[in-house]
Amino acid sequence: MKYKMFGTVMPTVNIELKKNETVYSQSGGMSWMSDNIRMQTGVRGGFGKGVSRLFSGESFFLINFTCERGTGIITFSSEFPGRIVPVQIEKGKEYICQKDAFLCAENTVNLEMHFRARIARGLFGGEGFILQKLSGKGTAFVNFGGEVVELNLKKDQMLKIDTGHVAMYEPTVDYNVRRVKGLKNIFFGSEGLFFATLKGPGKVWLQSMPVRKLAERLAGQKRKGSFLWSLLFGR
């Protein structure tokens, strides 16, 4: 399998498949393809796996795209302004990514639901406690909002992050959620009650524009301050 990235704000990934090579995506993920690509829809992994994907933000059905002859071309597009990031997965290597991040992958890559170790982390983290896990062997493509920053955290090195900006991390990274300290910070800081901490060692990917924040801006629902500000000024 070969691939090329095109575009900037709304990128696409163009995948070249040889005979009998297969990639899969969630339902409705494909943008265009050549006429020698066969499309086959299925649950992939059985009923239980399909239900778990619904909870992790993906579709119950997944679609396999297989090249039947010669060389085939299939293209997948970003679902929102941001970046498409290729992830090279090796045996024994896993990646934890945000809900809805999965775009497509080789047939040898596994897509599963992943629970955070403590449900409270997700309930108070602002982004849910169900994530996605990529494992197996091959190349997967994930879609993140805005620009993407990759950081390698050393052992015990820690970052404090707005929860929505955590796009993906290696399982060796310890993820936690902590409460913001100080009444002024809580009521007037406009950063919410909780922030995420990522503690090394391991690699993390951060996104500059979470989809949630983008949706709030487009809907005109972006708050100008704290809850108290809204009560006082009606904004």
Image (spheres, grey):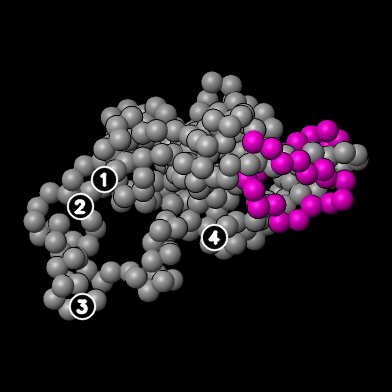
Above or below, 220 relative to 48: below
Kind of residue at badge 4: Phe
Q: Earlier in the sequence, mark 3 or mark 4?
A: 4
| Magenta-drawn stretch contains 148 | no
**Which tag is nearer the camera, tag 3 or tag 4?**
3
Q: Earlier in the sequence, mark 3 or mark 1?
A: 1
**CA–CA distance in space, label 3 to label 4:** 30 Å
Does the CB distance between marks 1 and 2 fall below 8 Å? yes
Kind of residue at badge 2: Leu
Callout 4 environment at 10 Å: few (<14), some (14 to 19), or many (20+)? some
Q: Residue at x 60, y 26 (%)?
A: 136
Kind of residue at badge 3: Gly
Instruction: Say what secondary structure mark 4 lies in.
Output: loop
Q: Going by the image, does 145 lie left or right of 32? A: left
**CA–CA distance in space, label 3 to label 1:** 26 Å
| Magenta-drawn stretch contains 40 | yes
Q: Residue at x 31, y 50 (%)?
A: 126
Q: In the rendering, at what x and y percent does residue 66 appear?
A: 79, 39
Nearer the observer, 79 or 173: 79
Q: Which residue is mark 3?
A: 234
Instruction: Say what secondary structure mark 2 lies in.
Output: loop
In the drawing, what numbered circle is on residue 124?
1
Q: Quadrant of the C terminus?
A: bottom left
Q: Residue at x 70, y 52 (%)?
A: 30
Q: Going by the image, does 123 lie left or right of 231? A: right
